[in-house]
Image: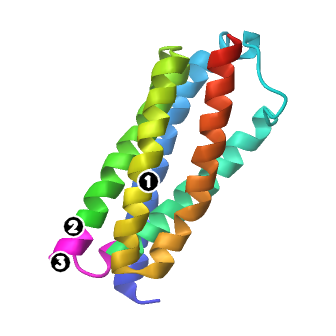
């Protein structure tokens, strides 16, 4: 691993974890009183699983973004890939605000569907730049699909 790749991956991981931290603040707001009272589907995982899974997802996303960034921001494909990544990161962070902070599961569902679509485009553009970077986003795409199903069922049941 080169110094440039290590530095850029570290910065990208830090940015991703910052978005995760901001999302956790919004999550805590709704989690204390609203979320425990909701009807949840049978496949709702234990609450203790969300933190470690999301931490891992943010680290993988950061490594992927760092790999793409290390290819040179002057290149138009790198810029395109990272712009997609930035927008999907904004949608990722806004989901927590919509679902937990504002307690609007339907708006959060629409947000997370848009996030998944944008994530597919991000994976496509990352693949243009670097296959490994694209593959590092696949666990997050699977997680987002699971979150869509969970969000939908919570909305439907409540």
Which quadrant of the figure has residue 38? Answer: top right
Instruction: Label 2, secondary structure: give it.
Output: helix
Q: Is residue 7 above or below residue 43?
A: below
Residue at 38% over, 60% down: 122
Circle 3: is it few (<14), some (14-19), or many (20+) Cα within 10 Å?
Answer: few
Q: Nearer the viewer, mark 2 or mark 1?
A: 1
- Residue 145 versus residue 6 in the image, above or below: above
Give the image location of residue 48, x and y in percent. 78, 38
The image quadrant of residue 44 is top right
Return the disc, 1 or 3, that comes first in the chain's sequence.
Answer: 3
Name the residue: 51% across, 19% down.
106
Which residue is denoted by mark 3 in the rendering? 75
Q: In this view of the protein, which residue sits in the foreground, 47 or 157?
A: 157
Q: Is residue 137 left or right of residue 87?
A: right
C-alpha span from label 2 to label 1: 15 Å
Looking at marks 2 and 1 on the same chain, the residue that comes earlier in the sequence is marked by 2
Which of the two residues, 55 or 137, is positioned nearer the viewer here?
137
Q: Which residue is mark 1?
A: 119
**Alpha carbon distance from label 3 to label 2:** 6 Å
Q: Nearer the viewer, residue 44 or 35?
A: 44
Q: Residue at x 31, y 73 (%)?
A: 69
Disc assigned to residue 79: 2
Q: Is residue 22 visible?
A: no
Q: Is the Cβ of the residue at disc 3 closer than 8 Å to that at disc 2?
A: yes
Range shown magenta = 69-79
x and y, in percent, of residue 46 in the image: 82, 35
From mark 1 to mark 3, how far is it between C-alphas? 21 Å
Judge from the rendering whether residue 22 lies leftward or rightward of residue 43; answer left or right.
left
Q: Could you tell me which secondary element the residue under label 3 belongs to?
A: loop
* Residue at the far bottom in the pictured view: 2
Can residue 111 be seen?
yes
């Amino acid at each position: 691993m080169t110094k440039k790749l290590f530095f850029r991956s570290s910065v990208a991981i830090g940015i991703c974890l910052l978005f995760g931290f901001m999302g956790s603040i919004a999550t805590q707001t709704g989690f204390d009183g609203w979320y425990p009272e909701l009807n949840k589907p049978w496949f709702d995982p234990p609450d203790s699983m969300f933190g470690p899974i999301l931490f891992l997802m943010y680290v993988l996303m950061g490594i992927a973004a760092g790999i793409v960034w290390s290819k040179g921001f002057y290149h138009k494909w790198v810029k395109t890939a990272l712009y997609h990544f930035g927008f999907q990161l904004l949608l990722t962070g806004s989901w927590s605000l919509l679902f937990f902070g504002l307690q609007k599961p339907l708006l959060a569902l629409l947000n997370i569907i848009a996030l998944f679509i944008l994530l597919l485009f991000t994976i496509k553009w990352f693949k243009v730049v670097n296959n490994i970077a694209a593959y590092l986003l696949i666990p997050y795409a699977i997680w987002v699909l699971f979150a869509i199903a969970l969000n939908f069922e919570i909305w439907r049941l409540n």
